[in-house]
Amino acid sequence: MRRDIINTAILWFVLTFLAELLLPNFPFPIQAAQEAVFSDESFRVLLVLGMPVFTFVVAVLAYSLWKFRARGDTLEEGAPIRGNSWVSGVWLAVTGGLCVLVIVHPGLTGLAKFAGNPQAQLVVKVTGKQWAWDVEYPAQGIVHASELVLPEGQRVEFQVTSSDVLHSFWIPAFRNKIDAVPGTVTRMYVTPNKIGSFEQDYNLRVQCAEICGAGHAIMSMPVRIVSAQDFQTWVQTQAPPTDPVKRGELLAKSQGCTACHSTDGSPGVGPTWKGLFGEQETLADGTVVTVDEAYVRESIGNPSAKIVKGYNDGLMPKNFGTTLKEGQINDLLAYIASLK
């Protein structure tokens, strides 16, 4: 028995040493916010302190499988193993202490860090919808932004909600995320600390982290972190365009239309918009229609009325007819008609 304990301890030490040797090389995404630094540090502590527990279980199981395996035709029962209340008590105390140290304490302090100091310098309203993010900067008068632009070094308050189903607002480079719940506004605080963009690192993006339907995987938005001066310059350039085609393009991106309808002729979840206006389309029931203003308006208000052959029904949200204003629909029509 003593030898078995020694052998198990040696195996445990070797496995723990190898595991801890590899942990420093564990890859993390870019840290683009102060909260990401704390999150990664907590995760490393969890790995370093939790790994010996994992390797201990593996060592005991592996040694037991090898040492006490059946040999030959022997079917005799092994000697009974007596319980030891002292060992059980120590083990429960150690594991309970590790749980408090590794899980409970970092969790509580982490929540305090993420939610503390709510004096935000910038408020961004975010609305999730199938399958896009609608971003608004109320103090700056910016609505329907096509990307999430944030100033470096300023604390940002995200006011997150949903207009249809449950979504989850997540930026991998920031680590923390929060649910977007219909009828409820949830808040998340972040302090960006690294200038960058989605083009430089794909972790700088808003990504839905809650399965929300067929377009869940493509429900994303690019994030760009700029200096405070560049942010003010960007704000000044965000005046609504006067060209209806340009307004329609921005609206299509902000409402998630281009997530399903391509504008370059490439295949997608829905028919491409390139060269669509004025053409004839064959519907699922075999009839042929001309894609004119009346057809587009009907498809926005009642997307299930006329389904193009080869495409599925039920994917397009059915509330655009009530959420979009008449002027916005006109802008979309102008944009679709311009895609020759």
Image (spheres, rainbow, N blue to C red):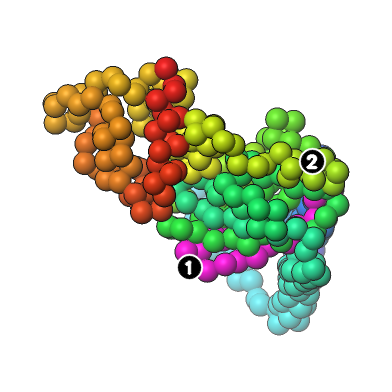
Q: Quadrant of the C terminus?
A: top left
Q: Residue at x 69, y 35 (%)?
A: 198
Q: Nearer the viewer, mark 2 or mark 1?
A: 2
Q: Quadrant of the N terminus?
A: bottom right
Let me know if residue 141 is in the magenta part: no
In this rendering, the answer to whether 67 lies above or below 203 is below
Residue 31, percent from left and from top: 80, 45
In this figure, which residue is indicated by the disc labeled 1?
183
Q: Secondary structure at mark 2?
A: helix
- Left or right: 159 in relation to 218: right
Q: Amino acid at mark 1?
A: Gly
Q: Residue at x 77, y 69 (%)?
A: 118
Q: Residue at x 40, y 41 (%)?
A: 329
- Label 1 CA crowd tier, 10 Å (few <14, some 14–19, many 20+): few
In this figure, which residue is indicated by the disc labeled 2?
233
Residue 66, percent from left and from top: 65, 48
Outermost residue on the left side: it is: 286
Residue 60, percent from left and from top: 69, 57
Q: Secondary structure at mark 1?
A: loop
Q: Which residues are magenta?
A: 179-194
- Left or right: 104 in relation to 214: right
Counting labels gives 2
Q: Residue at x 20, y 26 (%)?
A: 289
Nearest to N terminus: mark 2 or mark 1: 1
- Label 2 CA crowd tier, 10 Å (few <14, some 14–19, many 20+): few
Quick one: 280 or 244, which is closer to the camera? 244
Q: Quadrant of residue 84?
A: bottom right
Let me know if residue 192 is in the magenta part: yes
Quick one: 217 or 187, which is closer to the camera? 187
